[in-house]
Image: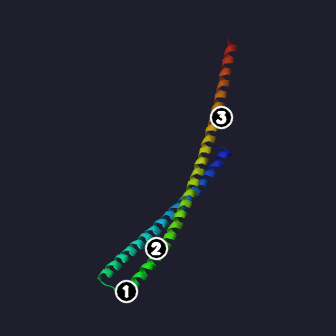
Amino acid sequence: MPKSDSTMHKLIDLTKEKADEAARQLQTANASRQSAGDQLDTLNTYRQDYADRLQKAISTGLSAANYHNFRQFIATLDDAISQQNKIVAQLDAKVELSKKNWVDQKRQLTSFETLLARQRMQESLRESKLEQRTTDEQSMNLYRRNQRGH
């Protein structure tokens, strides 16, 4: 294996490691985003459930203090939902950044693998030409010997 081929293999191996690490980071970012999205869904469901309870309590009669407590708790849920929306947005950005990094690493890996394949093809072509030249010279020498012999 030529030295450049060995160097290219090392470069490809390093790039594979970077691509694998980028894939792990993307997977972690996706899992975090999924978890945050699930928490947001739970908060929204809980808020809707509490709003429905408030409506039912209003229709059956509710003291001012209980009404205030319901509204205060719903406001607290709204704040939590707002914060969770911000977290989800941050994680969405992180997922996109991780995805871009992974795509870039895969693209670079593909480029290096293509370059190695081209180098191998060129080396093979050189070897074929050398073989052909050697075969042609041997044939010519044999032909000359046969011509002298006649």
Tell me the quarter of the picture where residue 50 sits: bottom left
Q: Height in image: 107 above or below 32?
A: above
Instruction: For marks 2 and 3, give the one nearer the viewer.
Output: 2
Q: Position of residue 85 (x, y in %)?
A: 49, 70
**Quadrant, the C terminus:** top right
Q: Position of residue 125 (x, y in %)?
A: 63, 34
Q: Are there few (<14), some (14-19), or many (20+) residues within 10 Å of tag 2?
A: some
Horizontal side of residue 53 vs 8, given as left or right: left
Q: Amino acid at mark 3?
A: Arg
Task: Look at label 1 and name its amino acid.
Answer: Asn
**Number of residues whose C-alpha sits closer than 10 Å to that of mark 1, classed few (under 14), some (14–19) or many (20 or more):** few
Number of the front mark, 3 or 1: 1
- Asked if residue 147 is positioned above or below residue 62 in the image, the reply reads above
* Mark 2 and mark 3: Cα distance apart in space: 67 Å
Label 2: which secondary element: helix
Residue 24 visible in the current orientation: no
Q: Position of residue 93 (x, y in %)?
A: 54, 63
Query: Residue 140, image x and y in percent?
Result: 67, 21
User: Image check: 24 left or right of 144?
Assistant: left
How many discs mark residues in the rendered view?
3
Residue at position x 44%, y 79% from top? 75
Residue 66: which numbered mark, if any? Answer: 1
Q: Amino acid at mark 2?
A: Ile
Colour pattern: rainbow
Q: Residue furthest top?
A: 150
Residues under numbered marks 2 and 1 in contact, where contact means CB atoms less than 8 Å apart: no
Q: Quadrant of the N terminus?
A: top right
